[in-house]
Amino acid sequence: MTTIFNPSRRKLLKLTGAASLAAVLPNIPASALAAGVAGAGPRHGLSVFGELKYGPDFTHFDYVNPEAPKGGRFVFTAPSWAYNQNPQTFNSFNSFILKGDAPPRMELCFDTLMVRALDEPDAMYGLLAESVEISEDGNVYTFNLRPEARFHDGSKLTAEDVAFSLMLLKADGHPQISQNIQELKDTEVLDEYRVAVHFTGKQSRQLPLLVAGLPIFSKRYYTAYDFKQSTLTAPLSSGAYKVGKHAVGRYVEYQRFQEYWGKDLPVLVGQNNFQIIRVDFYRDRQVSFEAFKKGEMTFREEFYSKIWATEYTFPAVEDNRVIRKEFPDGRPSGAQGWFINTRREKFKDPRLRRALSYAFDFEWSNKNLFYDLYQRTQSFFENSDMKAEGLPSAEELAILEPYRDQLPESVFETAYIQPVSDGSGFDRKLLREASKLLKEAGYERKGAELVGPDGAPLTIEFLNNSPAFERIINPYIKNLGRLGIQATFRLVDPAQYQSRLNDYDFDICSRRYSLTATLSEAIRTFWGSEAAKTPGTYNIAGISDPVIDDLMDKALEAETREEMNIVARALDRVIRSGHYWVPQWNKPIHTVALWDMFGYPKEPPRYDFPVESTWWVDTEKAKKIGKAG
């Protein structure tokens, strides 16, 4: 999904419209009216369901240290599941198109109309936009821009740039952006600092917020340069950072822009503290870890359980120069798993797909490979109120009943749970169940091979770009072999991996995706029929089901959070019944190792872990461990 980041306001308009409505509707808080009622006058923030934590006079977000010092360096490597980006190399600085591999964190360089408050599920407050007005019919959002906004070359950022950028992203942006904003109808420049964004009337409640979080480009710059081309020329931007030193395939530095126009805005107070944010690239996780041990990197979120459990024994740990910490993660935990490409004929039958789950022994893997650090993922909505559990509620049944003749009966029963093994690594009972499903799907065992209805042996290739996954996949492949399935592990270079995923040229691949606490148009790129046939979307499993399409529409049309959660649980039941993936694992914490030179707020926000934007270098700590300067 698109990243929304770093912004705020200078002077926020009085909510006169909301105040007058509050007099008529005294039981509704003025803040809710200001955020969620069309025609309520200029407002300083937006929320899908109307609730805003911060009033128009707020001075900073609660999860930042407003006295945080500026300066120093933050050096890390991006996680292997970084969205839309190749975490092992880069060959372009245009991260908003499908072509090329851009480095993670390019979003640091671009301002947006509004920015999320990370301690609220979906609330946004103005950055480029000082305020926003909504038409009576809810189809036109007029953004009032801050006249002080500037690009890094000193040129003004105006309504022309906003109107141009939004339509450019709709026409030529990455599919994961363009597919989500199709109900953006047009933009209209009202004057130099006022722009109206017109929607079709079919948009969800979330779409205006999604649009408010899109990057704004320089119209003048992209009139001279072709937006549709990948390039290693750093683009003109307006954000808190700009591209600094870089070496293709090795590192990129983002340098804090000293003359940044928005640095004193309240939602930027206590943020953007590092002078340099550097992303290092490594093709091998062990090499990356060795670099951290030497202090070449100063922060590492550990995603490898074996390393976390057994390898933090080096001298810098023993003398407390490197410390390990766990931070809570209150977000939906994300969907990590082996995604099955249902575009391929051999994977069309859900009984075959379900059988593949029986061959993965999570219990053995968790004990022997993961040191019991994980729990099993069951749902795309794990760690949230949107996850379906047990039997459907009366409300869920009311949503599902009109589709009964299009759905398997299992949808109306207990929500599907992945099989639990005896932990032996070779659970004969589960493998017998898998064999039974395969037989029902028309497969027969002929010697060592499992032959399908077409007379061809069933073969499966697991595609990956990390050798670290081989130790995890090999026991799974071994169990598949016991079923007669000829499975192999294919390791490819990062560029080829991304290209094959964009073109859906694989049997099964391992990926991790996360959802936000409030569903947005982005879910259509996960499970939508249109996304299934559009290159480069999140729908790598190729899910195409009119019932799922309808339920996504209902979830996005929900008028309350509880209604959204109910529809999401119904949707979860349908997706899980399709067996489009073999879910892997999750943990509701961030496991972090760091050189003890940083300061950070006492409590991270619930809905994100914004280390780069809210942490800072503690000079005294840095001196103590020899990291000053």
Image (cartoon, rainbow, N blue to C red):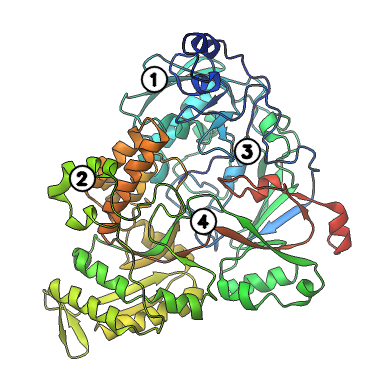
Please indicate, yes or no, whether residue 87 appears anywhere in the rendered image: yes
Q: What element does badge 3 sit on?
A: loop
Note whether residue 470 is visible: no
Q: Earlier in the sequence, mark 2 or mark 3?
A: 3
Residue linked to disc 3: 6
User: What residue lies at 39% left-to-right and 54% top-to-bottom?
Assistant: 380
Sooner in the amino-acid sequence: mark 3 or mark 1:
3
**Structural distance between the alpha carbons of marks 4 and 1:** 34 Å
In the foreground, 155 or 571: 571
Q: CA distance from mark 2 to mark 3?
A: 37 Å
Picture residue at 47% right of the left edge, 9% below the top = 24
What is the crowding at mark 2: few (fewer than 14 residues within 10 Å), some, or many (at least 20)?
A: few
Q: Dot 3 surroundings within 10 Å: few (below 14), some, or many (20 or more)? A: many
Circle number at residue 546: 2
- Mark 1 sits on what residue? 138
Which tag is nearer the camera, tag 4 or tag 1? 1
> Relative to residue 538, is residue 306 depicted above or below?
below
Disc assigned to residue 82? 4
Q: What is the x, y in percent for residue 484?
A: 24, 84
Instruction: Give me the C-alpha separation between circle 3 and circle 1.
Output: 27 Å
**Quadrant of the rendering where the C terminus is positioned:** bottom right
